[in-house]
Image: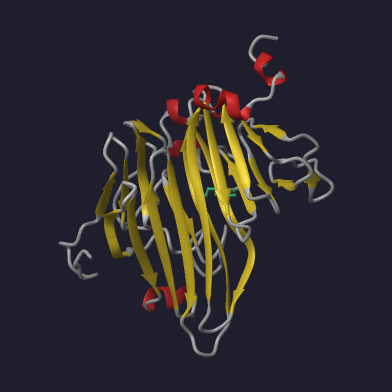
Amino acid sequence: MQKHHPLSNEYPRVIRLDRGGYTTCNIILKGASITSWRIEDEEQLFLSRRTRLDDYHKYRGGITIVFPHFEDWSFGRNHGFARDLIWSVKDGPKTDQYGDVHLELSLKSNCFTKSNWNYDFDLQYRIILKERSLDLKLLVLNLSKHETFYFQIAFHYHIKVKDSNKVAVAGVKNLMYRDFLDSSMELPFKTFYNDKFQLATPIDVVIYNTGNALQFISKGDDKIIGITKTSNMPDFSIWSTGLRRNLPNPREFDADELTSFIGTDIGNLSKVYLAPQSTWLASQNIEIKKENQTRGIMKNFIDYFDDIC
Ligand SMILES: O=P(O)(O)OC[C@H]1O[C@@H](O)[C@H](O)[C@@H](O)[C@@H]1O
């Protein structure tokens, strides 16, 4: 257990998980933000060069947590306060018998959170760095003896890709979605009729009630990003930079960075009600495979001709 005091300047602000073989993960306690995840020295997360990694600015990159509110909020900042506040270390980093590295963090209600959202909670976060994946677990505790509260929660990912316009999402057939950039849309919901959905930026969609596995197939760098999750995290947004709605402004990026990430939120974007003295637990695993490592598994016979004809 690392010793620290929340008001001391001496406790570590950045924690590095190191699995050996140049597989590492950096977590900044502000927002429990995973700002870097390298597999065999190759960076998997996008972090804009223009991001100021101090306690006051929003980080444009990495993986942060949306809690307790998704999107605009009359009581506080966009996507809630969990990504803005300083978390504390509960346990770790520790290496287990398989060589995986564990870290547990926690964010508890305090005067500031109560000025935005007047509830007693403890949000606990366990990160496990594995060989080619990250296991992310969230536990929400309602510490109140009397009051039920509700929240929205998601992992807010910026996944690094070579070209976001060469990325498809697989596993969406028959799912309902909303396209926030389609002004011609008469009905609020649309349906995907194919299993794959090709991204084209700018994009701002939310897909509802997804299954427990999703895949981003990134042709630009031959990567498959697989996400598996518990069923209580059914919703899934995909977004890019752009000058529409509340998309991140292109000025937050260098010119060569505009299409080098996929923005995605995966979580529960409807309301989760939590009774007093009870808990809510969810997890996700994000795994990166190189296309040549997965060909035999992921592709059927016809798909082998994709690149040829
Ligand atoms: O700029 P932020 O607060 O990180 O949000 C980025 C994106 O977050 C997503 O969750 C929203 O669906 C997008 O509309 C939004 O643009």
Q: Position of residue 121 (x, y in %)?
A: 45, 76
Q: Residue at x 41, y 66 (%)?
A: 124
Residue 50 seen in the figure: no
Q: Is residue 270 left or right of residue 278?
A: right
Q: Residue at x 54, y 56 (%)?
A: 154
Frontmost residue, 116 versus 189? 189
Frontmost residue, 2 versus 256? 2
Q: In the displayed orientation, state which residue is furthest to the top.
A: 308
Quadrant where the C terminus is found in the figure: top right
Q: Residue at x 19, y 62 (%)?
A: 11
Q: In the displayed orientation, state which residue is furthest to the front.
A: 97
Q: Is residue 197 left or right of residue 98?
A: right
Image vertical order of residue 233 relative to residue 63, above or below: below
Q: Could you say which quadrant of the image residue 165 lies in?
A: top right
Q: Could you say which quadrant of the image residue 257 lies in?
A: top left
Q: Residue at x 41, y 31 (%)?
A: 254
Q: Could you say which quadrant of the image residue 25 lies in?
A: top left
Q: Position of residue 253 (x, y in %)?
A: 43, 35
User: Tag count in the figure?
Assistant: 0
Q: In the displayed orientation, state which residue is furthest to the left.
A: 10
Q: In the displayed orientation, state which residue is furthest to the right.
A: 186
Residue 305 seen in the figure: yes
Q: Is residue 119 left or right of residue 96?
A: right
Q: Position of residue 270 (x, y in %)?
A: 65, 63
